Amino acid sequence: MLEGLPDYIDEIIIVDGHSRDKTVEAARKFGATVLYDNTGKGSALRVGMKSARGDILIIMDADCSHIPSEIGLLVAGIQSGFDICMGSRFIQGGGTEDMTLLRKLGNKFFVFLVNLLWGMNYSDLCYGYRSMRKDSIGKLGLESDGFGIETELSIRAAKKKLRVLEVPSYEKARASGKGNLRTFSDGWMILKRILKEFFMR
């Protein structure tokens, strides 16, 4: 276990895109394993998940928008029998300080489309705070390199009939820096991922 962390956390992996700030220095100071990938968010997540040794994986963004105290709820979801536990900003107890109206509308449209096509009841789709069983990763066969990774994960969980739970999560405004998400181009990427998954069935 890393010092200062709850006993159910014994490994932290940071996947860095060759940043020029002090991310790597800070991560190593606190005992985290640092890996590198500058292809995109999806590629970085796949690199980190492949390297992880634990039975339960927590994935979260590194911009301090996710609240660490919610990890317990994400872990509890897996311990209660679910394969994937997803944070949601749009169920009771959740919320966000970091989404524009346009992004909220886009997320709502994508949620509607995925629920319609795969008979799910998701409330949030493009959110990166999640937990999963390690043995679920191989079943998903994730391939997205960019911001479509969360959408792909949610759809493939539905297609593979995995047990999925949503829990409330509150997204804070990012602590510093500028996000890499581009509303229109990444929104188009997510839509293409949904259509690809539909025609792959």
Image: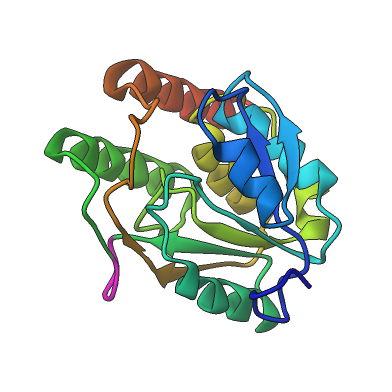
Residue 201, can we see it? no
Q: How many marks?
A: 0
Q: Quadrant of residue 67?
A: bottom left
Instruction: From the viewer's perspective, tell me whether residue 155 is left or right of residue 4.
Output: left
- Residue at screen point 79% across, 58% down: 134
Q: Quadrant of residue 170?
A: bottom left
Q: Quadrant of the C terminus?
A: top right
- Residue at screen point 36% across, 31% down: 179
The correct choice, above or below, for 65 with respect to 50 in the image is below
The majority secondary structure of the magenta stretch comes to loop
* Residue 120 sits inside the magenta stretch: no
Residue 82 % position (x, y)? 65, 73
Task: State how the image is colored.
Answer: rainbow
Instruction: From the viewer's perspective, tell me whether residue 139 is left or right of residue 119.
Output: right
Closer to the camera in the image, 198 or 72:
72
- Residue at screen point 44% across, 71% down: 167
Residue 128, can we see it? yes
Closer to the camera in the image, 12 or 129:
12
Region rendered in magenta: 90-94
Residue 89 % position (x, y)? 31, 60
Residue 14 % position (x, y)? 66, 44
Residue found at the far top of this picture = 185
Residue 137 % position (x, y)? 76, 49
Closer to the camera in the image, 97 or 26:
26
Closer to the camera in the image, 178 or 195:
178
Q: Quadrant of the N terminus?
A: bottom right
Q: Quadrant of residue 131?
A: bottom right
